[in-house]
Amino acid sequence: MPISPATYTVYQGQTWDQVAFDLWGREGMTHHLLAANPAYRHLVFFPAGLVLAVPAVEAPPIEEPPPWQER
């Protein structure tokens, strides 16, 4: 089941990984955004109001850390 909206409007200075985290709770999903928005791949920081296409993908479930990694 897709959990993404069709578009996402960025704010000034936002980055790819911040958008991925806002959408899916994972910075590791950034590659999906890059693939869906090839015209903007050169940007590191977004200008305010840029609208990105958001692919319909599911974030994998968050795994619990092993006991030795818990804080």
Image (tube, rainbow, N blue to C red):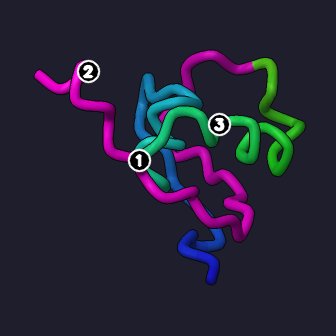
Residue 55: which quarter of the image? bottom right
The answer to whether 39 appears left or right of 65 in the picture is right
Please name the residue shown 51% across and 54% down the image: 9
Q: CA distance from mark 3 to mark 2?
A: 24 Å
Residue at image coords 67%, 60%? 54
Residue at the outermost bottom position = 1
Looking at the rendered image, the disc whose residue lies closer to the viewer, 1 or 3, is 1
Task: Name which residue type carries label 2.
Answer: Gln
Q: Is residue 38 left or right of residue 68?
A: right
Determine the secondary structure under disc 1. Answer: loop
Label 3: few (<14), some (14–19) or many (≥20) C-alpha neighbours in 10 Å: some
Q: Earlier in the sequence, mark 1 or mark 2?
A: 1
The span shown in magenta is 43-71
Q: Are marks 1 and 2 in contact (CB under 8 Å)?
A: no
Is 65 a magenta residue? Answer: yes
Q: Which residue is mark 2?
A: 69
Judge whether residue 55 is colored magenta: yes
Please, is residue 29 above or below residue 40 in the view?
Answer: below
1 is higher (above) or lower (below) than 65: below
- Please state which of residues 38 and 51 is positioned toward the viewer in this rendering: 38
Indicate which disc residue 30 carries: 3
Q: Please state the horizontal and vertical placement of residue 60, each as a whole percent of the image.
A: 57, 56
The residue at which mark 1 appears reads as: 63
Q: Nearer the viewer, mark 3 or mark 2?
A: 2
Q: In this orientation, which residue lies closer to the viewer: 60 or 71?
A: 71
In the rendered image, the quadrant that contains the N terminus is bottom right
Three-letter amino acid code of the residue under disc 3 = Thr
What quarter of the picture does the C terminus occupy? top left
Residue 11, given in percent of the width and then of the height, sits at 41, 39
